[in-house]
Amino acid sequence: MTDVNPVLLDEQLCFSIYSASKKFNHFYQSALAPFGLTYPQYIAMLVLWEKAPLTVHQLGERLELDSGTLTPLLKRLEKQGWVTRVRSQTDERQVLIHLTEMATTKRDEVYSRIGQCQTLLGMSSEEIDSMMTELVTVKQQLDTVSNERLITKEVDTVE
Amino acid sequence: MTDVNPVLLDEQLCFSIYSASKKFNHFYQSALAPFGLTYPQYIAMLVLWEKAPLTVHQLGERLELDSGTLTPLLKRLEKQGWVTRVRSQTDERQVLIHLTEMATTKRDEVYSRIGQCQTLLGMSSEEIDSMMTELVTVKQQLDTVSNERLITKEVDTVE
DNA sequence: TTCCAGTGTATTGTATACAATTAAATTGCC
DNA sequence: GGCAATTTAATTGTATACAATACACTGGAA
């Protein structure tokens, strides 16, 4: 009983991250309710505010999302007036995502709103830094493992 | 430039957690592919292996999921032969989730499979403990903030 | 020039998530 | 006992995620 099963600990860590992710999602969704943005929509806008236009592919690399997720998300953003989707003249396979005037105008309001809500979290830079460092390690491990096949292939004969 | 914008740091932390959560999800989905279980399905089974039968509500409390998520998930688990859904005799509003014989039989295989894959992550108990402690803090903050209204109500007049 | 491999986006199908509503059943209160 | 308030699941609608496929387009090889 004194030496805890590492399997269960890992599961608890995974569940903690899973749970925290959902809570953060909810936090941002509430904070951004005045603008009608969800968290994934918001981070898409963040990337675009940093540099636009971008192709769907470029945006997907930054957000770690594929076109199956981004295409409908961007259509919703377009319908709500944040972006326009324009097929590239030079390469018709690409779709360029541009910011609308409204998006440019509202940027500082959104930033300010997020700023207000985030201060409520009251986390120190040290805490945040520490967590981020550890998360990088975990994510690298997960990337490494998934690239080592093993999981999806050979071992499949679990019986 | 030397003092980093805390707003952006928080966003990066949120994104790191969001991203790690997706990677973990993928990791478990690959690891559990031989059994055809997704991560949410797996943690539902974990709770049930610990103690069954449970009502949908009880399961939802442990997993922090509501019936809108659990009902279809449990129907899928039922279709795949892991659980049975039986409306309670004593209170017909409740549905009791029972384990099937297959679920009981396969439990150790699933545990063993997860054990094999998790060792590949190679994280020390100290690392895991440290992350979990910090995640608890973050989640508590997020809970506190969301209960303090402020976000969804009064401040709505951002303008 | 024509064909082909590769690229980029969209679509389809499956599985979460969750807010909001509905429906059924139970409990408490008189 | 009878009815209102509460509880519990299920349903509906919207929004991610992502694998797999389809499709259009480009650039280069033959």
Image: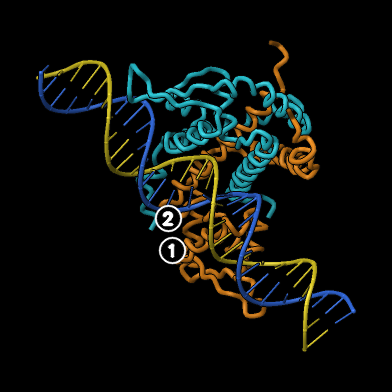
Chain colours: A cyan, B orange, C blue, D yellow
Report x, y in % for residue A69: 46, 38
Subunit of label 1: B
The residue that appears at 75% across and 38% down in the rendered structure is B151
For the residue pair A21 and B116, the one nearer the viewer reads as: A21
Q: Quadrant of the N terminus of chain A?
A: bottom right
Note whether A86 is above or below B102 in the view shown. above
Q: Which residue is mark 1?
A: B80
Asked which quadrant contains residue B159, the reply is top right
Task: Answer whether residue B111 is visible to the viewer in this image.
Answer: yes
For the residue pair B36 and B78, the one nearer the viewer reads as: B78
The secondary element bearing badge 2 is classed as: loop
The amino acid type found where label 2 is placed reads Gly
CB of mark 1 within 8 Å of CB of mark 2? yes
Other-residue count near label 1 (Cα within 10 Å), few / some / many at <14 / 14–19 / ≥20: few
Report x, y in % for residue A142: 50, 36
The amino acid type found where label 1 is placed reads Gln
- Same-chain status of marks 1 and 2: yes
Other-residue count near label 2 (Cα within 10 Å), few / some / many at <14 / 14–19 / ≥20: few
Q: Quadrant of the C terminus of chain A?
A: bottom left
Q: Is residue A83 left or right of residue D5?
A: left
The residue that appears at 45% across and 51% down in the rendered structure is B32
The secondary element bearing badge 1 is classed as: loop
Note whether A70 is above or below A101 in the view shown. below
Report x, y in % for residue A46: 59, 25
Task: Answer whether residue B126 is visible to the viewer in this image.
Answer: no
The residue that appears at 57% across and 68% down in the rendered structure is B97
Report x, y in % for residue A131: 67, 31
Subunit of label 2: B
Asked which quadrant contains residue D30, the reply is top left
Q: Which residue is mark 2?
A: B36
